[in-house]
Image (spheres, rainbow, N blue to C red):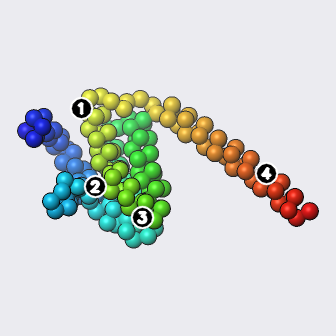
Amino acid sequence: MMKDGSQERVPRPELLVLEGITSLMDNKFRLPFTQFRFGLDPIIGLVPLAGNIMGFLISGLIIISMVRYGTSFKLLLLMLGNIILDFLVGLIPVLGIIFDVGYKANRRNYHLLDEHYEEGKHGGSGWGIIFIIVILLGLVLAGLIYLTQQLFELLKYILI
């Protein structure tokens, strides 16, 4: 029983290893005299680029292990989205470490997997997510094309 009176959820036996790795990466350590927890992921991320890539690869291996337990395509996309966001923001010096400490992508993915098993959430094909991503990428591409065109127009006026 936890301090707030709720029951602490015990991980399924087949997921205990994943729970341990996730905990190690995202919340294994606690700052003394606080409730602030962090794991190896932000520590690894202190090494510019290489640390971020290593954290991304470890997160990818965790997802591969999770997929072995039968996830839906939609759940896979949600988990990949978490680690890609973590990776991309992690590329930004200082902000990436702060984000990593707070976001905890591996913990979020484990929570998604737990919801999938315990509550039947996140089922389905995931094509809606892919459709949204394609639309967003198309808008970004259109914006880049527009900005490039405007840049050429500006250069034409400057050079002539």
Label 3: which secondary element: loop
View extreme (right): residue: 160
Does residue 55 appear in the picture of this structure?
Answer: no
- Name the residue rendered at 42%, 64% in the picture: 94
Residue 125 drawn at (x, y percent): 45, 31
> Are the residues at dot 1 and dot 4 in contact (C-beta closer than 8 Å)?
no
Label 4: which secondary element: helix
Q: Is residue 42 or residue 61 the one in the foreground?
A: 42
User: What residue did someone put label 1 on?
Assistant: 118
Q: Quadrant of residue 152?
A: bottom right
- Name the residue rendered at 87%, 58% in the picture: 157
Side of 145 where 78 appears, left or right: left
Q: Going from the N terminus, do you reach mark 1 or mark 3 first? A: 3
Q: Judge whether 17 appears above or below 10 on screen.
A: below
Foreground label between 3 and 4? 3
Label 1: which secondary element: helix
Q: Judge whether 146 appears above or below 1 on screen.
A: below
User: What residue did someone put label 2 on?
Assistant: 26
Label 2: which secondary element: helix
- Name the residue rendered at 41%, 47% in the picture: 82
Foreground label between 1 and 4? 4
Q: Amino acid at mark 1?
A: Glu
Residue 71 drawn at (x, y percent): 35, 38
Quadrant of the frame with the N terminus: top left
Q: Quadrant of residue 101?
A: bottom left
Query: Real-space Cα distance between discs 1 and 4?
Result: 51 Å
Side of 96 where 131 appears, left or right: right
Q: Find residue 144 and name its label.
A: none
Please rate how many residues cluster around mark 3, counting C-alpha atoms within 10 Å: few if below 14, some from 14 to 19, many from 20: some
Query: Real-space Cα distance between discs 3 and 4?
Result: 34 Å
User: What residue did someone put label 4 on?
Assistant: 149
